[in-house]
Amino acid sequence: MKQHDRAEISASTLYIVPTPIGNLGDITQRALTVLEQVDLIAAEDTRHTGLLLQHFAINARLFALHDHNEQQKAEVLLAKLQEGQSLALVSDAGTPLINDPGYHLVRRCREAGINVVPLPGPCAAITALSAAGLPSDRFCYEGFLPAKSKGRKDTLRALAQEPRTLIFYESTHRLLETLQDMVGELGAGRYVVLAREITKTWESIHGAPVGELLVWVQDDENRRKGEMVLIVEGYQSDEQALSVEALRTLALLQAELPLKKAAALTAEIHGVKKNALYKFALAQQEE
């Protein structure tokens, strides 16, 4: 595999450039080179990006591209790219488009045949997942949950039996309400990791069953300050769980057959474990 050790800026090319989520040392040399050499930088907040560029002594032209103007300004930027200019897209922090502006611009560029070059770099969701201690072979990123309680509960309810690890962003002022809704919709025993202020001075990563995590957060106001990522354990089906239909079949067969035989037949009919049926029936008899 051929590898490159330097960035070569091409005309009529859009570069997707991740920026640090806290620690400025996390910016890559390739990102700095692109930011130095492109004709124009499209930034979510030009003031914020201006401070970043100033820190690295980069002089560049900035163009504001944010949620409120992206659909209109994407056409302006596309025209510049078609004229031969090179363009870098950055957000306030992390990888553009991941809960940040850029989708409309990238889509228009691809539709118009403009070359889009993504750079690897910081992303709070992936950084937090890597340290959460939860399965990372299959996961789904859900961004921010709805701000209103009903919408949040509906979303959590729809995801309650999702087997993949779930990743959410959350704000300081909604963290407690979100954890409370997770207790109600996912159950107090669902394991959740709160990754706070990733790569920053007060970084903390704490995991616990969500009922315990809620108490832990309530105990100290500082634990709900800063940028938050919630990594939620996926739904784990209980292989021993017995459906209403299986228990009804067991009861009917028990009336005519010895318990072991009734359990064996029920297990075969419903695809559940014979021992689980047998133990359930014994427990019922003891009661």
Image: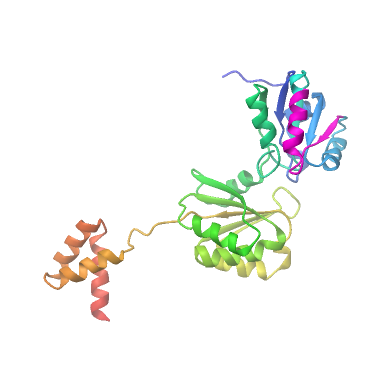
Q: Is residue 88 above or below residue 259?
A: above
Residue 12 placement, left or right of 274: right
The answer to whether residue 85 is seen in the rendering is yes
Q: Give the quarter of the figure containing the C terminus.
A: bottom left
At x 26%, y 68%, the residue is 247
- Farthest residue to the front: give it: 72
Visible residue check, residue 9? no
Q: Quadrant of the N terminus?
A: top right
Given residues 280 and 205, the one toward you in this image is: 280
Residue at image position (62%, 46%) is 125
Pinpoint residue 88: horizontal percent, then vertical percent: 75, 29
Picture coordinates of residue 120, whole percent (x, y): 66, 33
Q: Quadrant of residue 36?
A: top right
Does the magenta segment cover residue 106? Answer: no
Q: Residue 279, image x and y in percent?
A: 26, 69
Res 4 quadrant in image: top right
Q: Is residue 176 above or below residue 15?
A: below
Magenta region: 60-80
